Amino acid sequence: MKNTALTATHQSLGAKMVPFAGYNMPVQYAGINVEHETVRKSVGVFDVSHMGEFILKGDKALDLIQRVTSNDASKLYDGKVQYSCLPNENGGIVDDLLVYRIDDKTYMLVVNASNIEKDWNWISRFNTEGVDMKDISDRTALLAVQGPKAAEALQSLTDIDLASMDYYTFKKGQFAGLDNVLVSATGYTGAGGFELYVDNEHAQQLWDAVFAAGEAFGIKPIGLGARDTLRLEMGFCLYGNDIDDTTSPLEAGLGWVTKFSKEFTNSAALQQQKQDGIQQKLVGFEMIDRGIPRHDYAIVDADGNNIGRVTSGTQSPSLQKAVGLGYVANAFAKEGSEIYISIRDNKVKAKVVKPPFYK
């Protein structure tokens, strides 16, 4: 199992460590609910150094990205980030990812930890024009500093004006006495904040500086458990749960990052699917009756007929009610539709609602 540059720090802070995507990762420190609330109300720090980063460089770098991703990367400008996915050839998704345009010939792709090797092999397959590809995942540390007080807590560490940065943009500059830190106004929590990319050798210095600067703002370390409840309250997809090799981006509600203004892997078949109409759809739902929906629980109609499955579910710490995501047959996908989650052979009532659950 791999460690991040900060594993020993998490252990010294009393984190509960678990294996995740081949890494030894902190799942919680003080507890998921209290960590969740810290991020929603003030500021928290996640070590997400397990994520994968690839640098694509050369005259044909954009062409390669356009070929393998569903979104239109030609719309990017220097310092802009784009959410996208890598469609496969069978109508499913290899992975979802972020595309960073560093300059017109240099891009960084940020991929899910569990898919680093798979994504690398997939993109390499289409690299027929000699784009220089580097996998920098093992030498890159990534801290996500998230919450409404993130900009205020971090501002003393940099001359980059954090509060003025637009969502899904990034800047490179001095941060915590380190040169060339990539500061990205992105995150997976819906609470605002930044993601900070540095070389592993500087990870501890960055961590210490962030906690020193954030002390007056009640900054706390946050584990992957709260990361999951935070993203689920926003209705953000998690690869392996809500999207995978068998789910179409159109079924998953990712039509907004599926641009048919260009050709990409399987684009003709996906365009046909859009014209014909999808048979199932990923929806949000909240529980009306008591019960917590879990991954792979069956979704049924009033008569007990199977109409879909739960992909993610939890008791929402912010809302004090159980919420989930799941695929249902089209007839049940409309907002307000009554559905039932099969929990230990009981039909437990829920209703379809439009994410985000937390507003």
Image: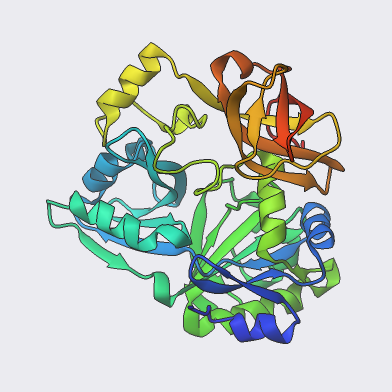
Identify the residue at image location x=66%, y=25%. 300
Position of 127 with respect to 324 (left or right) is left
Residue 188 appearing in the image? yes
Question: Measured from the top left, where is residue 294 in percent x and y?
Answer: 68, 44
Q: How many labels does the image show?
A: 0
* Viewer-proximal residue among 6 and 30: 30
Name the residue: 71% across, 32% down: 341
Residue 259 drawn at (x, y percent): 37, 28
The image shows residue 23, relative to residue 316, as above or below, that is below
Q: In this picture, is 220 found above or below 245? A: below
Residue 192 in view, yes or no = no
Residue reaching furthest front?
345
Decide if residue 123 is on the left or right side of residue 207: left
- In the rendered image, which quarter is residue 42 located in? bottom right
- Please identify the quarter of the rendering in which residue 143 is found: bottom right
Q: Depth check: 21 or 343 in front?
A: 343
The way the protein has been coloured in the rendering is rainbow
x, y percent for residue 171: 50, 59
Residue 316 vertical placement versus 249 (above, below): below
Quadrant where the image shows the C terminus: top right
Name the one closer to the observer, 152 or 90.
Answer: 90
Q: Residue at x 44, y 35 (%)?
A: 247
Looking at the picture, how far across and down is residue 244, in whole percent?
44, 43
Quarter assignment of residue 124: bottom left
